Image (spheres, rainbow, N blue to C red):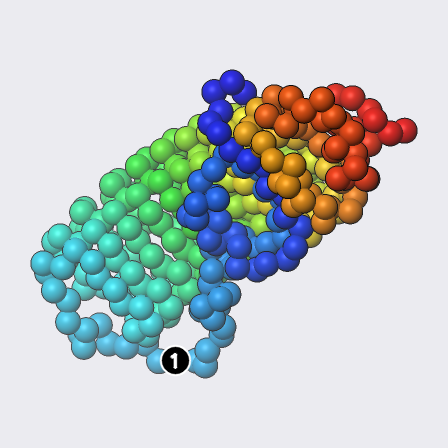
Amino acid sequence: MGGKSASKIKVETRVDKRMESEESGDEEGKKQAVRLVADLSQQSLRDEQNGENSAGEAETPVDMETISLDPEAEDVDLNHFRIGKIEGFEVLKKVKTLCLRQNLIKRIENLEQLQTLRELDLYDNQIRKIENLESMVELEILDISFNILRHIEGLDRLTQLKKLFLVNNKISKIENLSNLQMLQMLELGSNRIRAIENIDTLATLDSLFLGKNKITKLQNLDALTSLTVLSVQNNRLTKIEGLQSLVNLRELYLSHNGIEVIEGLENNMNDNLVESWSDLDELKGAKNLETVYLERNPLQKDPQYRRKIMLALPTVRQIDATFVRF
């Protein structure tokens, strides 16, 4: 833990449905802190705020010949154009970002010639399968959220992929990700996933979002030592475990589970820079908090270190490795 940078522990139990989509980018979120907050997943919550996941009336697909495409364009945004089929995009010789959000697309096809493409956004369509992406070897961001996917597949050649969003589909298993060794963000919220598995090769992963699934156990996370954000709220967890190797973790989202005891965070909550007793005020809302680890923080130098913690947090039974109440 000696290599960790200065940070503070912040534990929040108040429900604020705007937090997680903003946490990673604000000043506090950049500090090395472990946060337990009540929240929904990053991508799906941002979409809830924008009202983008609301169902609309049946629409008739537009004729692509009526859409004018600029061959020199680098960023092409065709959001909600009622496009029913991907076709005619081969004229885009310099395109880097292609946004086809909220259309009527049923199949990924006819993108083979877009060799310059770095970001593909197919959010909120009617796609049932990830396919025909083999030639897009330079792709860095892929979003196929809010579709009808049942399997993670067809991604083996996308070795440069850094961000993958598959929110709100019908995916039941984490699989076929082993080649994505450059991946930094994986967003699988609002699916049907029952187990955390098959992510051992994702050593560069920084953020993992698994909120609103059916996960019963925190497991198979040991290889993710670069992880700073882990979101597993709205699942079926009953215990905090399996986090001992996540020494760089800053943000941990576990609300709306069956967890009754805060434990298993010994490797994640020591060696920070908590120096003011007022910082503990943020823990007072955790009515069932029984264990707190604050070793090697400036507060520990206070001669009345344990006594002050006991007064500030009357439910705590264990401070660091020492039981103070039985």
Left or right, 192 with respect to 256, comes to left
| Residue at figure coordinates x 22%, y 72% from the top left | 64
Q: Position of residue 300 (x, y in %)?
A: 66, 24
Q: Nearer the viewer, residue 39 or 126?
A: 39
Is the C terminus in the top left, top right, bottom left or bottom right quadrant?
top right
| Tag 1 secondary structure | loop
Q: Position of residue 127 (x, y in %)?
A: 41, 60
Residue 324 visible in rendering: yes
Residue placed farthest to the right in the image?
326
Amino acid marked by disc 1? Glu
Left or right, 225 with respect to 242, comes to left
Label total for image: 1
How packed mark 1 is, by other alpha carbons closer than 10 Å (few <14, some 14-19, many 20 or more), is few
Q: Position of residue 172 (x, y in %)?
A: 58, 48
Residue placed farthest to the left in the image?
72
| Residue at figure coordinates x 27%, y 67% from the top left | 78
Q: Nearer the viewer, residue 11 or 177?
A: 11
Residue placed farthest to the front in the image?
303
Left or right, 107 with respect to 170, comes to left
Task: Give above or below for 62 relative to 321.
Answer: below
Location of residue 8 by image quarter: top right
Task: Give above or below for 243 relative to 194.
Answer: above
Is the N terminus in the top left, top right, bottom left or bottom right quadrant?
top right
Task: Give above or below for 268 relative to 216.
Answer: above
| Residue at figure coordinates x 18%, y 46% from the top left | 115
Location of residue 105 by image quarter: bottom left
Q: Position of residue 184 (x, y in %)?
A: 40, 38
Q: Which residue is mark 1?
A: 59
Residue 215 visible in rendering: no
Task: Give above or below for 40 relative to 208.
Answer: below
